């Protein structure tokens, strides 16, 4: 599987965020996107996810599902958690599992982020870190080859960061791809770096 | 289908659980209808004559105010991004949300409309017909309002912008809804033609609404 | 025990648990007695037996208004005296008062149909009671939609006190407007104008309704205290995980 971006141009709000961007990522590889605030890290992730339109350029995925768009084969972990306070922890995850995938894998995912004991609790009672973990559980519950992570380790304490690193390593070992935006290293030693320097 | 139902059930659950959201619309409808006689005077004959119009306007305003919440909460917590990355087309996702919204917001209005009709001195027999016209017409209000909700969610201007966008589009629904209700109560215009057109408007908006709303979301979220 | 001790939720709960069965029993006895007397009261020469709805309608009206009075005291307790159980009291009283007001509206409507020919008429008194009902719903909305019990209670307390202005208007509305409704004939200068054979069952029914109110009220307060305990326990469970 290979994800390739060629001569990508992105503009948001009339401003050209980045242009002439090239990258290539194979299965089992991770790409760490760095740069100052406003350099376009989040925009790149959203562009790959299909949430932001490409002004120019090409984005191709070889070896994936030819019928589906790239966004349908990717997980997007943005700054927000997409957790509904009035649903229980389990209900929140069950919904995303059913909407994004086949609906199974919920219990195992809750175990993976250590939220299983709180499964029946309304999500309103969770702390910010716990909500982040619930968000990450989504990645464990539904199998999708591409992971687009926007500053995944922020708001996580050390044990949670370790759990996330384990999940990421497992994903890469299974042949998945990771594109992560961060200000610093996120625990993947052999990640390639793409620096979005000043425009 | 499973995905469609999952979204539908989730939205219904959220609407029911978030502090009386579903009943708030019905309560607003009640209050708006109660306000009218204060402004118009207690003349029962007058109220009976314009009762159907009052009920239709009340239902329109009550549906409109609730539409604000349709996409706003999902946009605010990042769910909207994920909804666009599902295996189901965005048009269907939007339709599922609209159906959930109609079931929890508009249907209670339809159910209490006979009671409100009685308070406006509409005959008991005629209140059933009134409820039927609301039943046929409120889907159109919801699905047309869907477009306004999608347009305004990304502009972050809130409820008034939504109302300004949507109200003109709902004029045909209001005209034929009130015409059908009046025809049943007062005559002499037959009930059939306006009611049929009302149903057609609802069915048409069922298709047009999701497509337009999905397009609005895609362009707005960039 | 002094009343101030009841401010402690645990002591209040044990107080309620002891008192509630007696209150409930007294309510049932009073209702049985009142309904028996009401059935034996003479028919009205104009309205026939339908006048007996009055034995439900009038007490319900008074209780609807008294409910708001209880809520107003609770509201003062929340805002002025900061009594710990005041907001529990307000939240518990609101649905009960609303229910009595609704009973008043419905029985009044059913009474009006054979008597006046319509189910509803927009005269001053009925309309004021309807407005009272809507205010009840508004206060209930504030109590029930707030996630954090404390925040919603303060807002509801303010609304309660503002709405309390409505109560005097209802009482004197019949004198202010010339309406269809039965002129005030129970409490009037120079004694009551209603025959004692109707007045006594009416007062008994009013007593029964009042006992019913307080039975439900204390039970509702107990429920709310337990509900808050569950919430606190769940919060602790989430924080310790």
Image (spheres, coloured by chain):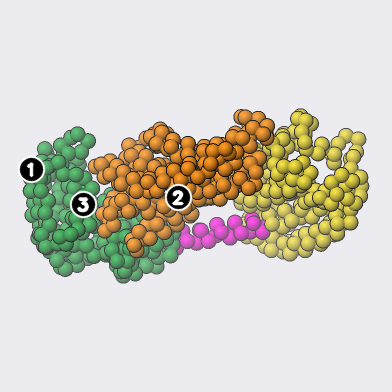
Chain colours: A green, B orange, C yellow
Q: Nearer the viewer, residue A83 or B87?
A: B87
Q: Residue at 10% of width from left, 48% of height from top?
A: A58
Contact, CB < 8 Å: mark 2 with mark 3? Answer: no
Look at the image and tell me in which quarter the N terminus of chain C lies.
Answer: bottom right
Task: Name the residue carrying label 3.
Answer: A49
Element marked by disc 2: helix
What range of the chain is rendered magenta?
A: C218-240
Task: Decide if residue C42 is on the left or right side of residue C3.
Answer: right
Chain letter for mark 1:
A
Q: Residue at 44% of width from left, 35% of height from top?
A: B171
Residue A168 in the image: above or below residue B100: below
Quadrant in the picture for residue C229 = bottom right
Residue C90 in view: no
Element marked by disc 3: helix
Residue A137 placed where, x, y %? Answer: 30, 62
Task: Name the residue carrying label 2.
Answer: B102
Task: Decide if residue C11 is on the left or right side of residue C205.
Answer: left
As for residue C2 lying within the magenta part, the answer is: no
Between disc 1 and disc 2, the foreground one is 2
Residue C110 placed where, x, y %? Answer: 73, 48
Q: Give the spatial CA distance, label 2 vs label 3.
A: 31 Å
Element marked by disc 1: strand
Task: Name the residue carrying label 1.
Answer: A20
Between disc 2 and disc 3, the foreground one is 2
Q: Residue at 50% of width from left, 45% of height from top?
A: B192
Residue C151 placed where, x, y %? Answer: 52, 45
Q: Same chain, marks 1 and 2?
A: no
State the predominant SS element of the stretch in magenta.
Answer: helix
Q: Give the spatial CA distance, label 1 vs label 3.
A: 18 Å
Disc on the earlier residue, 1 or 3: 1
Dot 3 alpha-carbon crowd within 10 angstroms: few under 14, some 14 to 19, many 20 or more: many
Q: Give the spatial CA distance, label 1 vs label 2.
A: 46 Å
């Amino acid at each position: 599987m290979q994800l390739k971006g060629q001569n990508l141009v992105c503009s948001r709000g009339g401003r050209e965020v980045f242009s002439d961007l090239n990258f290539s990522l194979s299965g089992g590889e991770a790409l760490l996107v760095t740069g100052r605030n406003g350099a376009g890290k989040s925009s790149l992730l959203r562009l790959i996810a299909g949430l932001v339109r490409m002004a120019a350029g090409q984005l191709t995925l070889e070896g994936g599902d030819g019928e589906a768009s790239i966004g349908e084969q990717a997980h997007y972990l943005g700054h927000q958690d997409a957790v509904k306070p009035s649903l229980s922890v389990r209900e929140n995850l069950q919904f995303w599992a059913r909407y994004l995938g086949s609906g199974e894998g919920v219990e195992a995912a809750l175990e993976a982020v250590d939220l299983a004991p709180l499964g029946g609790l309304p999500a309103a009672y969770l702390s910010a870190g716990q909500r982040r973990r619930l968000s990450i559980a989504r990645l464990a519950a539904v199998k999708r080859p591409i992971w687009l992570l926007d500053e995944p380790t922020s708001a996580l304490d050390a044990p949670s960061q370790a759990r996330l690193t384990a999940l990421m390593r497992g994903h890469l070992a299974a042949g998945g791809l990771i594109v992560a935006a961060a200000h610093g290293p996120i625990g993947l030693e052999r990640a390639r770096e793409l620096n979005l320097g000043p425009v | 289908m499973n995905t469609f139902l999952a979204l539908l059930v989730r939205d219904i659950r959220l609407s029911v659980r978030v502090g009386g959201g579903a009943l708030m619309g019905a309560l607003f409808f009640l209050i708006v209808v109660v306000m009218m006689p204060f402004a118009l005077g207690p003349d029962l004959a007058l109220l009976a004559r314009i009762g159907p119009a009052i009920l239709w306007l009340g239902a329109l305003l009550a549906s409109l105010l609730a539409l604000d919440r349709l996409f706003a909460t999902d946009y605010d917590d990042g769910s909207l991004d994920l909804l666009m990355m599902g295996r189901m087309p965005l048009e269907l996702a939007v339709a599922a949300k609209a159906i959930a919204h109609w079931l929890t917001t508009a249907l209670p209005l339809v159910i209490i409309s006979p009671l409100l009709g009685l308070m406006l001195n509409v005959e008991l027999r005629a209140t059933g017909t009134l409820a039927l016209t609301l039943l046929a017409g409120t889907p159109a209000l919801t699905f047309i309002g869907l477009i306004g909700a999608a347009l305004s969610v990304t502009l972050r201007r809130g409820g008034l912008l939504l109302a300004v966008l949507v109200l003109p589009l709902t004029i045909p629904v209001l005209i034929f809804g009130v015409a059908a209700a009046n025809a049943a109560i007062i005559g002499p215009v037959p009930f059939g033609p306006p009611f049929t057109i009302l149903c057609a408007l609802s069915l048409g908006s069922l298709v047009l609404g999701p497509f337009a709303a999905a397009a609005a979301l895609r362009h707005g979220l960039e | 025990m002094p009343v101030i001790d009841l401010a402690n939720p645990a002591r209040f709960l044990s107080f309620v648990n002891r008192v509630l069965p007696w209150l409930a029993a007294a309510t049932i006895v009073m209702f049985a007695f009142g309904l028996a007397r009401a059935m034996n009261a003479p028919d009205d020469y104009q309205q026939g037996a339908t006048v007996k709805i009055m034995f439900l309608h009038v007490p319900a009206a008074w209780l609807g208004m008294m409910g708001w009075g209880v809520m107003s005291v609770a509201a003062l307790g929340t805002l002025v005296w900061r009594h710990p159980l005041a907001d529990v009291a307000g939240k518990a009283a609101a649905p009960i008062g609303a229910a009595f007001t609704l009973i008043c509206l419905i029985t009044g409507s059913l009474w009006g149909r054979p008597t006046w020919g319509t189910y509803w008429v927009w005269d001053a008194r009925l309309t004021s009671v309807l407005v009272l009902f809507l205010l009840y719903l508004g206060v209930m909305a504030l109590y029930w939609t707030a996630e954090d019990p404390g925040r919603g209670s303060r807002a509801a307390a303010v609304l309660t006190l503002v709405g309390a202005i409505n109560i005097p208007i209802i009482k004197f509305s019949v004198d202010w407007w010339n309406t269809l409704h039965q002129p005030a004939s129970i409490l009037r200068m120079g004694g009551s104008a209603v025959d004692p054979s109707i007045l006594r069952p009416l007062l008994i029914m009013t007593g029964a309704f009042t006992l019913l109110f307080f039975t439900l009220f204390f039970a509702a307060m107990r429920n709310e205290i337990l509900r808050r305990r569950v919430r606190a326990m769940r919060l602790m469970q989430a924080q310790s995980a």
